[in-house]
């Protein structure tokens, strides 16, 4: 039997303020450097609307997986209506929550992986306290996987991981099987995921309009055991605001798949129902590095990565929780992506702003230690 695993990603990163130090310096703080993400009423209403559609889909036989970042979870917990909406979905017993680095951070790239592990543990604890689930599936930032990361996932007790199904990892293989490198791996089907994420409302796309039966036929024609779709909530919300077609698609997909004999599953289901195949390409260093180009593909990103890691070493010596929490906010992958060369010339302005903020943060760290 062929199976489909759909994972929704929700992130709500802390955005940097446009910043320039005024006369006299203030003590480093979250409010000094970052915008609050708790006052976006439009986003809240959009999530509530999409959650209702997801719940209707579950009532039609769907199973879904959620990867919700720490900052986004904080926003959910702070909003009673949002929290109730997600708990209603959880109570269907058809939802699995995954673990990831709390801040969707680049900590997996640090030489010392203790920060990476600490953020995963923090995220697991928040999931447990909020939804009373113990995550068994690990998803790294940017869906990045390597031999070292999969080994860590196994050592931390996870049952499986979801990673990017990129050509450099798969080589001649397809992302439609359950692989194993220390731990079972579900690999995102890039084309099918982006058909929904990026192309759904594109009237010039050859697949438009995408209806549930058509998408099911595509899946049915593909060889393999498991199709993994990894979808960004924000992208689906954009489609939702442009067309009601996405509502019908999500709500009708479970019945369409079932009619074709295709089962909707969570990652844990896959680990017990599918045969695993080795993924030997992860042993190669060049494969592991390929996926980080969007984060450290230019000189400015590379410098900032070194600044982060060096400053973390200083913070760990101080045992100052306030500075540690701020530093973790500076590790968000969104900050690196904002400096990606594809965003030029705005990437340059983002970099200037970031280094202005981060130099002020470092000043506060140095002065704070001298005052002790």
Image: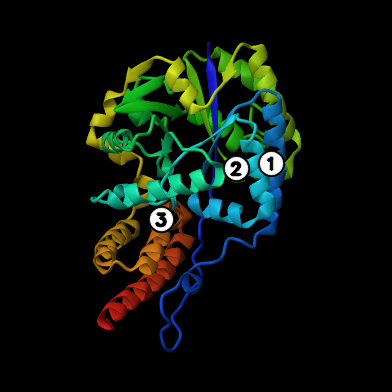
- Residue for point 47% across, 21% down: 270
Q: Which residue is mark 3?
A: 336
Q: Give the crowd class for mark 3: few <14, some 14-19, many >=20 residues within 10 Å.
A: many
- Secondary element under disc 3, as helix, strand or loop, is helix
Question: Is residue 62 shown to the viewer in this render?
Answer: yes
Q: Quadrant of residue 4?
A: top right
Question: Is residue 209 shown to the viewer in this render?
Answer: no
Q: Give the crowd class for mark 1: few <14, some 14-19, many >=20 residues within 10 Å.
A: some
- Residue for point 29% across, 28% down: 182
- Residue for point 47% across, 55% down: 343
Q: CA distance from mark 2 to mark 1?
A: 8 Å
Mark with earlier residue (1, 3): 1
| Proximity of marks 2 and 1: CB atoms separated by less than 8 Å | yes
Q: CA distance from mark 1 to mark 3?
A: 28 Å
- Secondary element under disc 1, as helix, strand or loop, is helix
Q: Which mark is residue 195?
A: none
Residue 65 horizontal/vertical position (percent): 54, 33
**Residue that sits furthest to the right in the current view:** 244
Mark with earlier residue (2, 3): 2
| Proximity of marks 2 and 3: CB atoms separated by less than 8 Å | no
Q: Give the crowd class for mark 2: few <14, some 14-19, many >=20 residues within 10 Å.
A: many
Closer to viewer: mark 2 or mark 3? 2
Q: Which residue is mark 1?
A: 50
The relative height of residue 232 versus residue 213 in the rendered view (above or below) is: below
- Secondary element under disc 2, as helix, strand or loop, is helix
Mark with earlier residue (2, 1): 1
Q: CA distance from mark 2 to mark 3?
A: 21 Å
Residue 322 horizontal/vertical position (percent): 39, 68
Residue 351 horizontal/vertical position (percent): 41, 65
Q: Which residue is mark 2?
A: 233
């Amino acid at each position: 039997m062929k199976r489909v695993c759909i994972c929704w990603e929700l992130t709500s990163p802390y955005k940097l303020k446009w910043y320039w130090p005024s006369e006299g310096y203030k003590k480093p703080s979250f409010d000094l450097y970052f915008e609050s993400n708790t006052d976006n009423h439009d986003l809240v209403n959009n999530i509530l609307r999409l959650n209702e559609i997801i719940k209707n889909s579950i009532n039609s036989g769907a199973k879904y997986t959620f990867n919700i970042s720490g900052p986004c979870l904080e926003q959910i917990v702070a909003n009673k209506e949002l929290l109730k909406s997600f708990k209603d979905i959880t109570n269907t017993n058809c939802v699995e929550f995954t673990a990831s680095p709390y801040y969707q951070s680049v900590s997996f790239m640090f030489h010392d992986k203790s920060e990476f592990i600490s953020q995963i543990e923090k995220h697991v604890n928040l999931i447990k306290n909020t939804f009373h689930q113990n995550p068994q599936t690990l998803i790294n930032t940017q869906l990045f996987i390597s031999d070292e990361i999969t080994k860590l996932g196994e050592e931390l007790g996870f049952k499986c991981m979801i990673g990017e199904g990129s050509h450099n990892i798969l080589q001649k293989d397809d992302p439609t099987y359950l692989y194993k490198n220390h731990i079972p791996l579900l690999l995102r089907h890039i084309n099918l995921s982006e058909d929904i994420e990026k192309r759904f409302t594109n009237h010039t796309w050859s697949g438009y309009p995408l209806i549930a039966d058509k998408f099911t036929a595509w899946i049915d024609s593909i060889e393999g055991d498991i199709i993994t779709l990894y979808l960004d909530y924000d992208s689906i919300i954009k489609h939702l605001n442009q067309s009601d077609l996405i509502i019908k698609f999500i709500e009708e997909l479970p019945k369409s798949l079932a009619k074709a004999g295709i089962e909707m599953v969570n990652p844990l289901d896959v680990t017990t129902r599918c045969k695993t195949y080795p993924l030997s390409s992860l042993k190669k260093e060049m494969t592991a590095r390929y996926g980080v180009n969007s984060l450290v593909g230019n000189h400015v990103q590379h410098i900032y990565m070194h600044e982060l890691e060096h400053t973390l070493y200083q913070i760990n010596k101080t045992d100052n929780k306030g500075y540690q929490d701020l530093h973790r906010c500076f590790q968000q992958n969104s900050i690196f992506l904002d400096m990606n060369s594809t965003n030029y010339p705005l990437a340059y302005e983002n970099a200037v702003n970031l280094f202005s903020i981060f130099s002020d943060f470092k000043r506060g760290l140095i002065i704070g230690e001298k005052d002790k």
